[in-house]
Image (cartoon, grey):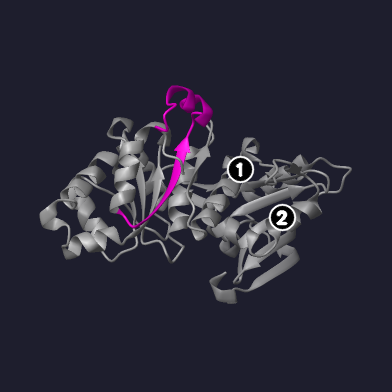
Amino acid sequence: IAGGRSSYEVINQFVAEKVTNDDRTRRFDVTLLINGFPMIHIELKNQAHPFMDAFRQIKKYSIQGKFRGLFGFVQIFVVTNGSNTRYIAADVGERLNETFLTSWVDQNNESVEDYLNFAKEFLKIPEAHQMVSNYSVLDTERKQLIILRPYQIHAIEAVKEASRNQQSGFIWHTTGSGKTLTSYTVTKNLLQIPSIDKTIFLVDRRDLDQQTTGAFKSYAENDFIDIDNTENTNELLKKLLSADRLAIVTTIQKLQIIIKRYSKEDKKDSSKTKKLRNLHIGFIVDECHRTVTPEVHRAINKFFNYPLWYGFTGTPIFEENKRQRKGDLPRT
């Protein structure tokens, strides 16, 4: 992370001082610091106690005002009794909800409960650093920190690896699996890859792109990227030609208009056309089984020299193939 310039520390038995005269000092079990800031706090119980005792202890400490000052920077709480381990996004005590305690699962969908195995997968460097930087999102609208779930993280990592190898693909998801959050994080993380100039989240105009744009902007307000929607085609063109590395939310119809305009004979050799054609673009497509037809997919690939495609679909591909047997789905 950051070219190896980051500093990592582990502290234990930190004494949280009294807040009031009636209060008691508290000792925190283990805290992980990144560049001097406490980021992940771990509360431990022995196997004679349920892990929920550790969760209730954190909640009590938070209500008592122990997680303030520098400890207000903590982003993730981990609770374990050795045999059962969970993580949750940090929040103020009253809002900490046990419903959001999450088990870590590996890429084979096997649950990782043992605390040492959890540490080896979740708390090692750089994974712990990535959890608090790449895989945490602050939802401004709800005023809540969100830590992604394991299946979301594995999907995003697979997309990043594919992009490094100049490969495309699709992500299948179910209703309620957090597709918008996953697609936002894909869009954000792809911009960290130097070879990609822009990321474009494509929706069909039938699919209320304003709703997606609103969610993206709520996530991005406190993030390091700019999310831009496009009011009209000229606005989209301006953003594509800008020197800024942007994440853009737009409709497939607006993109088609630009491609048709700059495919005409009088514009084929213009400097704008050359700049557009040579953009390295990561396309993230919502409802990819119907948003981008094979015909449109071929037209976009013909126009742009360096496109990569990552589609989200809630429809099993084999079901689509039953209805579209002649190669109508873009094969990526």
- Residues 161 and 8: in front is 161
- Tell me, yes or no, whether the two marked residues, 2 and 1, touch with CB atoms within 8 Å: no
User: Which kind of residue does numbered mark 1 sit on?
Assistant: Tyr
What SS does tag 2 mark?
Answer: helix
Vertical side of 4 occupied by 264: above or below:
above
Q: Which mark is residue 121?
A: 2
Answer whether residue 292 is visible to the viewer in this image: no
**Labels 2 and 1: the sequence-earlier one:** 2
- Residues 272 and 244: in front is 272
**Residue 302 colored in magenta in the image:** no
Residue at the far bottom in the pictured view: 5
Residues packed near mark 1 inside 10 Å, few (<14), some (14 to 19) or many (20 plus): some
**Quarter of the rendering occupied by the N terminus:** bottom right
Residue at the (69%, 40%) spot, across then down:
109
User: Which kind of residue does numbered mark 2 sit on?
Assistant: Glu
Left or right: residue 143 compared with residue 7? left
Label 1 belongs to which residue?
151
Image position, residue 245 (x, y; %): 34, 62
Marks 2/1: CA distance?
14 Å
Left or right: residue 243 compared with residue 76? left
Residue at the far front in the pictured view: 326
- Residues 186 and 171: in front is 171
What SS does tag 1 mark?
Answer: helix
Residue at the (31%, 54%) spot, across then down:
304
Quadrant hosting residue 25? bottom right
Image position, residue 76 (x, y; %): 62, 53
Start and end of the magenta stretch?
304-328
Answer whether residue 212 is visible to the viewer in this image: yes
Vertical side of 315 occupied by 121: above or below:
below
Image position, residue 209 (x, y; %): 31, 38
